[in-house]
Image: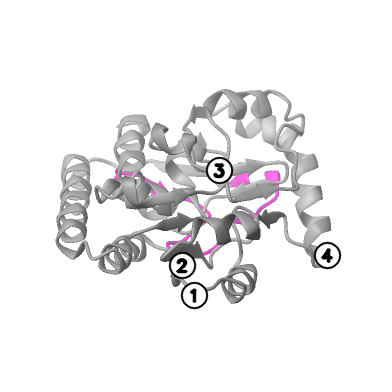
Amino acid sequence: MRVVSLLPAATETVAALGAGGYLVGVSHECDYPPEVRALPRVTRTRIDSTRASGDIDRAVTEAQRAGTSAIDVDVELVARLRPDVIIGQALCPVCAVGAGDLERLVATLMPTPWVVTLHAHTLDGVLADIHKVGETLELKDEADELVAGLRYRLRRVADRTQGSGRPRVLVLEWLDPPYVAGHWVPELVEVAGGRALAAAPGEPSRVQPWRELVALAPDLVVIALCGFDVARAQTEFATVADPDARTLFTRRVEFLDGNAYTSRPGPRLVDAAEMLSRLIPR
């Protein structure tokens, strides 16, 4: 079976199912497991990711206002790869190929590949998407085993944090402007023994003013920036000059690799829960 993955979480899921050899093409952001870096890249971004986060946000906003996509697909390359399956998403048009662009891509391909669209907003949704990928790849048993293992690990984290206090935890996935991490992140915080602030499970990430975030009085602020590793997040953090932000950051601040762990709705969300359980004060 020949699979093209248009997002990192799907690539990680296929690999976790033991089907990494099925992958014949991946997105420009796919970097895990390391061996996928050698595969053909079927997408590219128009956004310069080396720019400051405020510049990136403005470029994305301008593209959305103009009705243009931030992600381009190499249609000719996808056609040459002749995939049996294409895995896309309907969650965020900024970070990966959107649903509309995916439909237009598939319409150009002959023979027409099977399309799997992932759209999880919660942990249960992520696990359901793993099952969906497994069934498509005729790996239902492997998917059952993988999901059972992930649920077991989540239960172990939750069991270890039962009976302790629930520190107030604020997770930020962007700093300019400040975005509170939503979707599955509040659930990760709860599993890890914290009380998630300013976001509810399944709700989108959203902008909230620094002054309002200060008023939440978190016990812990976790900086887990979408698309950025810890080193890049620390660089962005050092440039935040807003007085209210600096007041917020007098509280305990920890960093997590948002690119690898909290922003990708795949198997490594469980790793994120385990990491958060070590960061949350007891």
Q: Which residues are magenta?
A: 192-215
Between 2 and 139, the one lying in front of the other is 2
Q: Earlier in the sequence, mark 1 or mark 2?
A: 1
Residue 204 on the magenta segment: yes
Residue 101, image quadrant? bottom right
Q: State the separation of the CA atoms marked 1 and 2.
A: 21 Å
Are dots 1 and 3 in contact, CB under 8 Å? no
Q: Label 4 to label 1, Cα distance in Å?
A: 32 Å
Residue 66, horizontal then vertical, whole percent: 85, 65
Residue 192 visible? The answer is: yes
> Sequence order check: which comes first, mark 2 or mark 3?
3
Q: Is residue 1 above or below residue 278?
A: below
The mark that comes first in sequence, 4 or 1, is 4
Q: Residue at x 55, y 49 (%)?
A: 27
Mark 3, secondary structure of its residue: loop
Name the residue carrying label 1.
Answer: 112
Q: Callout 3: few (<14), some (14-19), or many (20+) C-alpha neighbours within 10 Å?
A: some
Along the viewing direction, whichever of 98 and 38 lies nearer the viewer: 38
Quadrant in the rendering for residue 241: top right
Above or below 66: residue 50: above
Q: Which residue lies under the disc numbered 3?
A: 29
Q: Nearer the viewer, mark 3 or mark 4?
A: 3
Q: Which mark is residue 119?
A: 2
Which corner quadrant holds the N terminus? bottom left
